[in-house]
Image (cartoon, helix red, strand yellow):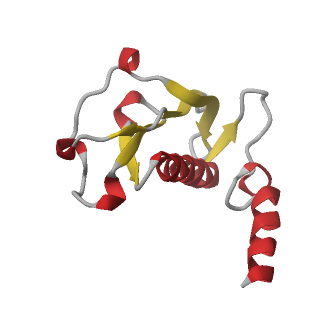
């Protein structure tokens, strides 16, 4: 079930703006990209994409235009936030491979530096996990 969500109804807990430009089109103009995650909330049974314990809570995530808003779910609020952050990071990594992407500060987005999954923060955690396994 997809429900329309207006901007007035969403309380974003984190958001960031980027600018993107297609590399393959000469003289392409920059467009604004908005990514955000909302406050997690307990979902009604009718809102859950799957009716299991794995979809008890959800966050709204936006990756680009308002039409991209969708619900990411988790067993609890923390898991829903984790899933939402991973969705945003994956979107930014994919977009940066296809287009020029800049942060609010005007610096280019580099998934190997700025990304959560590929960047230096992840390598520290991945190393720690590998040592414990």
In this rendering, position of residue 68 left or right of residue 25: left
> How many numbered marks appear?
0
Is residue 31 or residue 128 the one in the foreground?
128
* 59 over 19 or under it: above or below: below
Location of the N terminus by quadrant is: top left
Is residue 67 or residue 61 the one in the foreground?
61
Residue at 38% across, 14% down: 8
Q: Position of residue 14 (x, y in %)?
A: 60, 31
Q: Report which quarter residue 107 is drawn in.
A: top right
Q: Report which quarter residue 9 is drawn in.
A: top left
Residue at 72% across, 62% down: 118
Q: Position of residue 73 (x, y in %)?
A: 39, 50
In this rendering, position of residue 133 left or right of residue 84: right
Is residue 39 or residue 66 the one in the foreground?
39
Q: Residue furthest top?
A: 8
Q: Position of residue 115 (x, y in %)?
A: 70, 52
Location of the C terminus by quadrant is: bottom right
In this rendering, position of residue 89 left or right of residue 110: left
* 85 over 37 or under it: above or below: below
Q: Position of residue 75 (x, y in %)?
A: 41, 56
* 40 over 126 or under it: above or below: above
Residue at 33% across, 54% down: 55
Residue at 77% across, 65% down: 125
* 72 over 107 or under it: above or below: below
């Amino acid at each position: 079930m997809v429900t329309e969500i207006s901007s007035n109804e969403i309380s974003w807990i984190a958001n960031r703006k980027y600018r993107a430009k297609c590399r393959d089109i000469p003289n392409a103009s920059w467009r604004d990209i908005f990514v955000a995650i909302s406050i997690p909330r307990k979902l009604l049974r009718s809102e859950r994409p799957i009716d299991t314990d794995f979809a008890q809570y959800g966050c709204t995530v936006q990756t680009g235009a308002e039409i991209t808003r969708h619900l990411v779910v988790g067993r609890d609020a923390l898991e829903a936030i984790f899933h939402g952050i991973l969705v945003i990071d994956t979107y930014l990594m994919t977009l940066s491979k296809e287009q020029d992407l800049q942060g609010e500060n005007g610096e280019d987005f580099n998934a190997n530096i700025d990304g959560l999954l590929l960047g230096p923060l992840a390598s520290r955690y991945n190393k720690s996990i590998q040592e414990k396994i």
